[in-house]
Amino acid sequence: MQQTGQQHAIVPREKLDFGLDGNIPKYWFAGDPFKTRFFDALSTLFPEGEKFFIVCVRDFSAGITDPQLAQEVRDFTRQEGQHGMVHTRFNTRLEEQGVKVQRLMQRQKDIMFGVFRRLFSRRYTLALTAASEHMTAVMAHSFFERREILQDTDPRIRAMYAWHAIEEIEHKAVAFDVMQKVAKVGYFTRILAMLHVSWGMPLHTFIIMAHMFRVDGFSFGQRAGIWLRGLWWLYKPGGLYAPVLGHYFAYYRPGYHPWKAGQMRTYSSWTDTFERTGDPIAAGNALHAAGI
Ligand SMILES: [Fe+2]
Ligand SMILES: [Fe+2]
């Protein structure tokens, strides 16, 4: 991973077709319940999560005087709006499998809009947004930097995550810039919010996965095995997260900026293929193939 980055343009892309209505296996990730449900749980978090991000950035729209940043906020909003729509479409598959998607989303909404936005300051909820955006950028790197990670996955769902990852990289600095330049959030609040997101995001993902495994009908013993193997896959040395820990911790540096740390080496393999073919699945395959 390079440690200095070239800023990418934020390009909202609409009406992409990932073929999600097709015949996709339930356990689309290597036939593995943990790996599949980990990504499925993230998908249930996106629609409400991204609405929250948009609202928390917009709280400060009126104070933005830099026209470039104002345009970036508009493009960020359009990208996040599209992500929410596509994940909502994907989530209907989960609903059909018995997952209580509406209930999960309502609980998340109650926490974010009913508790966080009622209890915390606008500056703190913006800091939560910037921290979450850092986490999604780190995940984008983790999922696509190495080919082996998403090797045995359905290419349609992988393409949905590839597109989402690319756009998360493109707009990764928007909430951060509004937080620093407009809301003037200090270092302490930024780090507090990052600590909050660092336990809150995995905790909620795991609670949703636990619900999914019960819906899937696994016995207690089976679930114990699934969790043990799955947590090892996530956190083992060389696993999903260990190689991107440096990128994660970069956020704690006082002079940190998203374009200073973590550049997606394979970014242009997606954009080049998408520009040439207009096909998001081909672009997803290209991004995956370009991994090391
Ligand atoms: Fe997003
Ligand atoms: Fe985002």
Image: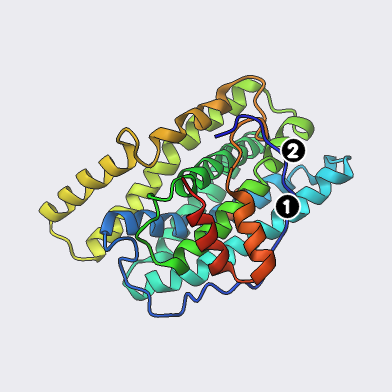
Residue at point 55% right, 32% down? 193
Where is residue 183, by image quadrant? Answer: top right
User: Where residue 221 is drawn, which disc sits there?
Assistant: none
What is the C-alpha distance between the residues marked 2 and 1?
Answer: 15 Å
As helix, strand or loop, the secondary structure at mark 2 comes to: helix
Mark 1 Cα-neighbour bin, 10 Å: few <14, some 14–19, many ≥20: many
Q: Nearer the viewer, mark 2 or mark 1?
A: 1
Q: Amino acid at mark 2?
A: Val
Is 82 situated left or right of 150 in this image?
A: right
> From where the camera sits, is residue 140 visible?
yes
Residue at point 49% right, 33% down? 196
Q: Earlier in the sequence, mark 2 or mark 1?
A: 1
Mark 2 Cα-neighbour bin, 10 Å: few <14, some 14–19, many ≥20: many
Is 185 situated left or right of 31 in this image?
A: right
Where is residue 30, by image quadrant? Answer: bottom left
Disc 1 Cβ-to-ligand 2 distance below 8 Å: no
Q: Which of the two residues, 183 or 141, is positioned nearer the viewer here?
A: 141
Please, is residue 271 above or below residue 145 in the view? Answer: below
Residue at point 52% right, 31% down? 247
User: Where residue 178 is drawn, which disc sits there?
Assistant: 2
As helix, strand or loop, the secondary structure at mark 1 comes to: loop
Query: In x, y percent, where is residue 263?
Result: 61, 38
User: Where residue 10 is drawn, which disc sits there?
Assistant: 1
Query: In x, y percent, where is residue 138?
Result: 52, 40
> From where the camera sits, is residue 47 visible?
no
Quadrant of the rendering where the N terminus is positioned: top right
Q: Amino acid at mark 1?
A: Ile
